[in-house]
Amino acid sequence: MTLLDSSIFRFRLSSLHVSSRSLGVYFAGIMFASAVWVFVDAALYSAFDYARNLHITFIDWIPFLCSILGIVIVNSIDKSRLSGDSFAYTDESLARKARFILFIGFALLAGGLGGSFTVFILKYVVAGYEGKSLLMGSANIISNILFMISATALWITGNMNDDYHYNLQL
């Protein structure tokens, strides 16, 4: 009896080939989904917790939306457009525009994180809330940190070559 016959599952984990690029993309997706889940969970908790007067309002959503917009902008830039090499099929003005748009995307990500800290301090800490109310405020910070990790992981893995990627140039 072989190992495959005595196993419950049809496949062995050692036979699965997962490249580092796909692992990075999966990790970025997990971080993005976790960020959305943390914030939406806090928003739903504040909406259905009738004992408190504190709720997540549109002010809390602004840093969240800025971070999502920043992720969309950062990951929609073609990385080959960033280099203004004379051998590439791009001109210098296109590379400069791509770098500027990339800067705007990362600025939106950083602004979302800074905005979440600002909302947390001004709305929750200064007002003197305690316990689960502080957890609702910190959910915005946690989700924006997870967004930045997701965007960074996807940016890094977007620049990696896949294991079976052949670059054929003369």
Image (cartoon, rainbow, N blue to C red):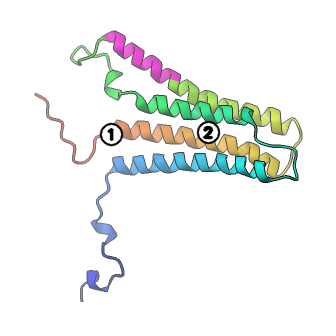
- Checking the image for residue 139, the label placed there is none
What's under tag 2, amino acid-wise?
Asn
Q: Amino acid at mark 1?
A: Met
| Residue underneath mark 1 | 160
Report crowding for label 2: few under 14, some 14 to 19, many 20 or more residues within 10 A (C-alpha): many
Image coords of residue 51 (percent x, y) = 88, 53
Q: Tag 1: Cα neighbours inside 10 Å, few (<14), some, or many (≥20)?
A: few
The residue at the point 72 percent across, 44 percent down is 138
Label 2 element class: helix
116 in relation to 136, above or below: above
Snapshot quadrant of residue 79: top left
Callout 1: helix, strand or loop? loop
Please tell me whether residue 139 is drawn above or below residue 15 in the rendered image: above
Q: Quadrant of the N terminus?
A: bottom left
Q: Position of residue 20 (x, y in %)?
A: 34, 50
Query: What residue is rendered at 57% in x and 43% in y?
Result: 146
The quarter of the displayed image where residue 76 is located: top left
Q: Position of residue 16 (x, y in %)?
A: 30, 63
Which label sits in the foreground, 1 or 2?
2
Query: Mark 1 or 2 closer to N-term?
Result: 2
Task: Find the residue positioned furthest to the bottom.
Answer: 1
Q: Is residue 134 left or right of residue 19?
A: right
Looking at the rendering, the stretch of residues picked out in magenta corresponds to 92-104
Residue at the image position 87 percent from the left and 49 percent from the top: 52
Q: Is residue 132 left or right of residue 34?
A: right
Q: Where the C terminus falls, by quadrant?
A: top left
Residue where numbered disc 2 is placed: 144
Q: Is residue 124 magenta?
A: no
Q: Main secondary structure of the magenta part?
A: helix
- Is residue 66 or residue 13 the one in the foreground? 66
Query: Residue 116 vs residue 24: left or right?
Result: right
